Every structure is written in structure tokens, then in C-alpha cells.
Amino acid sequence: MSYEAAMLKQLAMPTRQQVGEALLRALLKHGGVVKEFGAGQEIVIELADECELNDLQRSAFLETIYRKENRLKKSNLWHRLLFRAADSLAKENLVTRPTQTVRLTNKREWMLTEKGLDQALALCNIPAAEKDDLSTKSYEVQKIVKKLLEASTPNNYDPFDRKKTSKSITRESVLRTRGFRQAVIEAYSHRCAVCGLKVKSPDLITWEVQAAHIVPNGLLGRDDVCNGVALCHLHHWAFDVGWFTLMDDYKLQVSPKIHSLPAGVGKIGDYELFGALAAKRTKISLPDKHAIYPHRNAIGWHRQNVFHYGS
Ligand SMILES: [Zn+2]
């Protein structure tokens, strides 16, 4: 038995597999990414807490003597174990290494792969069917997100994807849909573009905000950020049914039908839901990059076909 293995045994440290599973659960909680491990870093401490390590287990050092150089090298045993567990996950293609992730995100992080995400969901007893609604990052989806956020849009943009078939669901179309959702909510900083609401579920896994298609997916609307807008559940619904639309200057236009709402309808307490929007006629919050603003051709279609039709 090696010196390190003997020490792991003597201190009753968790196994590499147990640490790997704790890391997968932590990745899910942190949206699919955690920083590259460094001594004293929050994630290193969080995982030690998760594995219920005692003080001795946290502070044990492995000492290696380099005789030639007459030097003693000390390395933290827990830190080494954590790194080895992450390395094993990378070998099984459950996570990507910081060296690989940095090329995609410019950040040195460990990131889940699709396979790792499936495994993390299983470990947390989350049904695989809920995966589509999660905004957890995975390496494969992030590649699509990057492409969508860096896209440039021509003036004569066609918001319809004539080649898209709404019926055939392939692995590619599933990843593309998740990529669209994540790119839109990332572009709008996880906030509703209308009311600014930004909140996660208590388990920190899901954002409340949704990525709304402007030309709907069911009508072959493209999965491009410029055919989308991030909206909270309520404003998503109100937009889809035509309670409001967007003008070319990105100001809100509310349906005149609010004036004929019966008393007590469309209110939260004394707050008039759409009346408040109509009174303000404010501009929605927009992404940093102009190229991914909602496209005029998409919002023009919404005005013509959803808003006027309902008004
Ligand atoms: Zn909202």
C-alpha cells in the first residue's frame, strides 16, 4: 500500500467514488460549473462539509521528501483526493477539465457534460424528464449557447425556419432547444425583460425566468436569441396571448382591452397588472449586444399576428 493510500485509510477518508458523487451533486447545485480547485477555495470547503470531514481529515498533509533537492513538499490530502475524484469523472466523460472548459468560456472551471448531467440528476432523484426545463450548463449545450450569443443578424432576417419540422425530435434538436433557452436567459441576465424579476427555486437548480419565442416554436419560429426575449411566467403568458407587444423602439404596447376588464379582474391586490404596464409605456430591458436584440421582423410579426389579432 502506498504512503498516500495508507494515510487515506488511517484517517478514514471518503472513497474517490463518494467524493466524485458529492462533486456531481455540487455541480448540479451550482448550475453545472464549479471553479478549478484552489486551496482554501469555497468549493473545496463546501465539498469537505458535504462529505462531513472532521478537522483532522481536512488538515492532513502528505509529506514528500525530494532527496536530491533536499526539499520537503507538503500537500493537503483532501485537496489531492478531490482533484483525483474530479480527474476520474473527467476520464469517464462526466465532466470537462478546466483546461478544456477555458477554451469555451474563458473561465477555468469544471463543467458537467450531458452524460454527467444525467448522472447528477439520477443522484439527486430528479426525473430525467425535467432536464429540459433546467438551466444547468453542460459542455455540449454551452457550445450552442456560445454560437447563439455571438451570432450576427442580417437586416432581412427571416424569423421562420422553413426547414424546421416541429414533429421530429432528435438529440440535436433537444440540445438546440436547451441552448436557445439558456442563451436567451443568459443574454437578459436571468431577469424578466418587462418587470425585472430574477429568482431561483429554493434548491437553486431552476431559474424562474423563461425564454419566450417571439415567433412561436410551434409555428417554426427560429431558435435564435433575436427571436426570443426573457420573460417571467406571467409576462410570458401575457405576451403569448397578446396582452402586450413590442414596438420597434422596444417600448411596450398594451392591448386597449384592459379598459374593458371587469372590476377585480387582472389585479394582484390593488395592483393593476397590465394597467401599470400601459401607464408606463417603458422600454424593456435589453441584452448588452445590439446584434441579439429582438429582431424587428420578429416583433413586427408578433404585432400583426398576435397583438392585433387579439385586439
Ligand atoms: Zn415579468
Image (cartoon, rainbow, N blue to C red):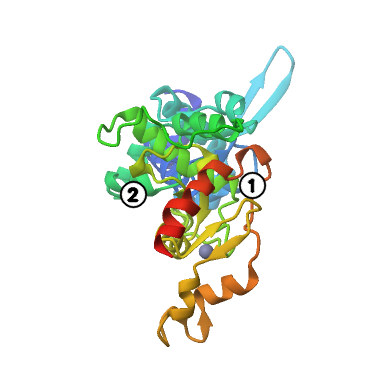
Residue drawn at x 36%, y 27% as measured from the top left: 163
Position above or below: 94 against 59: above
Seen from the viewer's position, the closer of residues 255 and 270 is 255
Residue 47 lies left or right of residue 59; in this view the side is left
Q: Which mark is residue 266?
A: none
Residue 160 placement (x, y as % from top left): 43, 36
User: In which quadrant is the C terminus drawn?
Assistant: bottom left
Residue 27 lies left or right of residue 72; in this view the side is left
Q: Residues within 10 Å of mark 1 (few under 14, many from 20)?
A: many
Foreground label between 2 and 1: 1
Residue drawn at x 27%, y 33% as measured from the top left: 169
SS label for mark 2: loop
Q: Which mark is residue 287?
A: 1
Residue 186 placement (x, y as % from top left): 56, 45
User: In which quadrant is the N terminus drawn?
Assistant: top left
Residue drawn at x 73%, y 22% as measured from the top left: 71
Seen from the viewer's position, the closer of residues 80 and 284 is 284
Task: Tell me the residue that label 2 is attached to.
Answer: 124
- Which comes sooner in the sequence, label 2 or label 1? 2
Position above or below: 58 against 283: above
